[in-house]
Image (cartoon, rainbow, N blue to C red):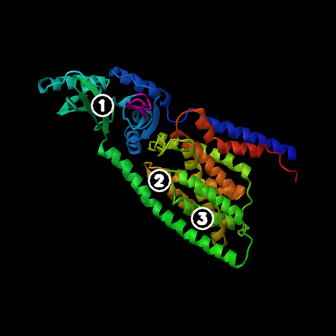
Amino acid sequence: MFRVRYVLQVLLAAAALIAAVALVRDRGVPGEVQAGALARAALVRLGYEPLGEPTATFEGDQELAWALERARPGPAGVGLARGGGGALRWRVVFPGGGEAQITVDGVVWSLRRPVPSAPGPDLFPSLARAQVEAAVARAVPDPSAWQLVRAQSWREGGHIWQRGWFMGGAGDLPSGWRRELELEMVGSTVVSWRRTVHPLGTDLGVVTGRMGELRLLSRPALLGLGILVIGVFVAAAEAVAYRESTAIARGLAYGLVTATAGSFASDTLVAAPIQGVVVAVVVALLPVWTDLPRPRLRFGPVAGVALAAVALAGRAFILGAGGWTPVTPPVPGDVGPIRLLADSWAPALAEEPLLRGALPALAAPVVGWWGAALLAAPVGVLLHPLPTVPLAASLALELVLQVGLAVVARYAGVGGAVLARGTCEALVRRGSFPVGPDWDRVALLGVLLGTVLLLWPPRRE
């Protein structure tokens, strides 16, 4: 029996690792490597040879990307967000001067070169308009679709500058959308252009309105967590008064880790130090709540892989059923390995001890363990739903994940639920960060930890 159980653990570890690799393979933001070459070539076409190796920074307009996806459901909307819609871009800056914005699908979105010392002859008003209209061909692949609507001239630095505003209609964008282009020349040399997209109010309004509704819905959940935190501190005072056994050192260590992760995360539930203090008290009190399930950490990451597969499959099901849910993942505030780790693990470290530890411990005497676990599920649902249409689909998918975490907590303890949530978040959020094996390895850290725990030879009972 001992050997059979260990063989099953080995097979489980292998299956989880294979599934996790399949979930992260070829996911992420493309175009970082090509962006530098495309920016350099575009600047060379303007007569400027950039020096040095450029740095690329990912930028995104989240609402615009999701509005494009809603207006053109499916791959067409995703393609527009990554290309002709300009919602997801790499900003490329050369150390010797010159910068550009390149969409993740390789469209030159904006460009600026240093002002040349000899920009050519000045364009006088009688010739400027025709020259500015002709220059738009350097900025867009379909110059015939663009119309000059306004021009401006002024003298600066001994030369005459020209600025033109162009309107391009909808083009490949959804009907009712609008494209604009602003182009600048000094003398007879084009020095910059910048493209913008103006969405249809209905498409953008649905996305921003839904996001506003979700922020409003999160308030009852935050109120519930506030009441729970008060209960935790009352329980802590009681434990101290009755000199009950607590794990103060473990609680302090866990609180420090949580506060550190929260300080690097882009979207924390509350301030990181407050999170650290609250979860430190919860973890310190876990020995007092002796009826909580015993931790089985090795099964947490495996459950996290399963939950991540359910989350990604659920989004595909919503789209296939005729609803809309964002395909483009949320754009991080900063692109770096530490941000991927923090955004993935900070919610798990801060929320799971409360929802899967403190709430069941305090409410179980009244409604039982499962009743308390199901009571925690709506709180978790309202904290992180996606702006899906219809909203019920997003809430239902999040409820499935919350119930799944409750099951994990029941059979693998609070620690198992933390590992499951962190692993799931890392695999799902992988798409927000650049393509590449280094980022894949960061996203797979939880799975690798689970593999080590499952392959570690257990003690004979």
Mark 1, residues whose alpha carbon is within 10 Å: few (<14), some, or many (≥20)? Answer: many
Q: Amino acid at mark 2?
A: Ala
State which tag comes first along the sequence, 3 or 2. Answer: 3
- Residue 248 percent location from the top left of the image: 70, 66
Which residue carries the number 1 mark?
Answer: 193
**Nearer the camera: disc 1 or disc 2:** 1
Residue ID at (62%, 35%): 22
Q: Which quadrant would the C terminus be assigned to in this image?
A: bottom right
State which tag comes first along the sequence, 1 or 2. Answer: 1
Q: Amino acid at mark 3?
A: Val
Location of residue 213 with respect to 133 vertically, above or below = below
- Residue 285 percent location from the top left of the image: 68, 68
Q: Secondary structure at mark 2?
A: helix
Q: Residue 29: which disc? A: none
Residue ID at (53%, 68%): 226
Image check: 315 left or right of 178?
Answer: right
Looking at the picture, tell me which residue is in the foreground, 33 or 326. Answer: 33
Which residue carries the number 3 mark?
Answer: 277
Which residue carries the number 2 mark?
Answer: 392
Q: Secondary structure at mark 1?
A: strand
Image check: 435 left or right of 179?
Answer: right
Check residue 249 for magenta coloring: no
Looking at the picture, tell me which residue is in the foreground, 416 or 118. Answer: 118
Residue stretch in magenta: 91-106
